[in-house]
Image: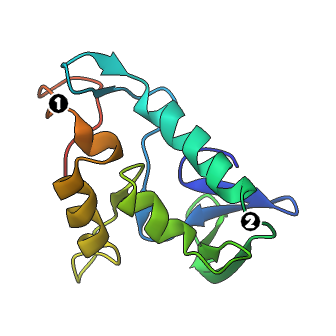
Amino acid sequence: MIDGDTIEIAGERIQLNGVDAPEDWQVCLDESGADYRCGKESSLALDAFLSASRPIRCEFAGRDRYGRYIGTCFRADGKDVNRWLVESGYAINRENHDRGLYAAAQEMARSLRAGMWRGQPRAEGSQRVAEE
């Protein structure tokens, strides 16, 4: 695991397709309006989720501008890693021409106030993760 939306398998970095997690250094607002390191929380949650059922298998859709594979990954038990990240509120749906692969999963996380959605919207112009 590299960060909240990038993993490494056999020396190859894989950007998880259709999701965008905060960077490790980014902060969000919690329920009380205080900052917390949601990027670090996303990374740790992904690591724990992957560790629960190995090996990880990925289906690739190409490479990104950094040369990383872009893929949808699955744990050994068949659970979709990308979808889980968004459903759990640890990443947001990366929109494309059709509202993104995980728009419904994001709406579910938002309605349940899961992960990043548990807090208050960020102040404009801050270094906090934006609500999208």
Position of 97 with respect to 58 (left or right) is left
Q: From the viewer's side, name the closer residue of 126 and 21.
A: 21
Residue on which disc 1 sits: 122
Kind of residue at disc 2: Ser
Q: Are marks 2 and 1 in contact (CB under 8 Å)?
A: no
Badge 2 or badge 1: first in the primary sequence? 2
Q: From the viewer's side, name the closer residue of 129 and 49.
A: 49
Kind of residue at disc 1: Arg
Marks 2 and 1, how far apart at CA: 34 Å
Q: Residue at x 23, y 83 (%)?
A: 98
SS assignment at label 2: loop
* Residue 42: % across, % down: 50, 42
* Residue neighbourhood size for the residue with mark 2, other residues' Cα within 10 Å, grouped as few (<14), some (14–19), many (≥20): some
Rendering quarter of residue 19:
bottom left
* Residue 2: % across, % down: 68, 45
Residue on which disc 2 sits: 53
